[in-house]
Amino acid sequence: MRYEWIDEYLLSKKGVTKDLQKDWNWIRYHIGGKMFAAVCLEWGSNKPYYITLKLDPDEGEFLRSQYEDIVPGYYCNKKHWNSVKPDGAVPDDLLKDLLDKSYDLVLGGFSKKKQKEILESI
């Protein structure tokens, strides 16, 4: 995988937890118990085959038209979720920006009170 920094980057964000969803073989990243990103692993080799994240639908559609390595979300709602091929040509800075947006989008879905609780629980 090109993006070896992804785990450290995501876990450095306030309030983020991760788990392994064994039934899917996905490493999931959560904020407030809601997933905002996942690294989907191949069965057997545990090699990443997609990095999945949530985006504004219009932005996701635009990015999919600009980068062949960004596709509709794998096993997710294809309107809101997008998947990035981990050995593709999406620049690191763009992927970091997309992961930040996914984090902010999911965090922003909570009430202001809940956001404060999540961010201060560290």
Image (spheres, rainbow, N blue to C red):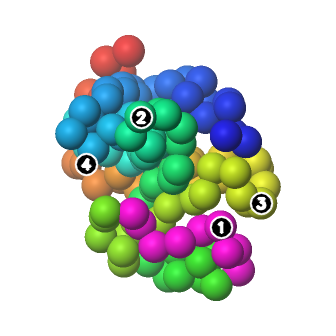
At label 1, counting other C-alpha atoms closer than 10 Å, the crowd grade (few under 14, some 14-19, many 20 or more) is some
Counting residues from the start of the chain, the first of labels 4 and 1 encountered is: 1
Whether the residues at callouts 4 and 1 have beta carbons within 8 Å, the answer is no
- Front-most of residues 94 and 5: 5
- Judged from this view, the residue extending furthest toward the front is 44
Q: Quadrant of residue 74?
A: bottom left
Q: Is residue 77 magenta?
A: no
Residue placed under numbered mark 4 in the picture: 110
Question: Distance from label 2 to label 4 (Cα)?
Answer: 37 Å
At label 4, counting other C-alpha atoms closer than 10 Å, the crowd grade (few under 14, some 14-19, many 20 or more) is some
Residue placed under numbered mark 2 in the picture: 44
**Residue 32 is at least partly visible in this image:** no
Which mark's residue is nearer the viewer, 2 or 4?
A: 2
- 14 sits to left or right of 91: left
Whether the residues at callouts 3 and 1 have beta carbons within 8 Å, the answer is yes
Whether the residues at callouts 2 and 4 have beta carbons within 8 Å, the answer is no
In magenta, the rendered stretch is: 66-74
Which mark's residue is nearer the viewer, 2 or 1?
A: 2
| Secondary structure of residue under mark 2 | loop
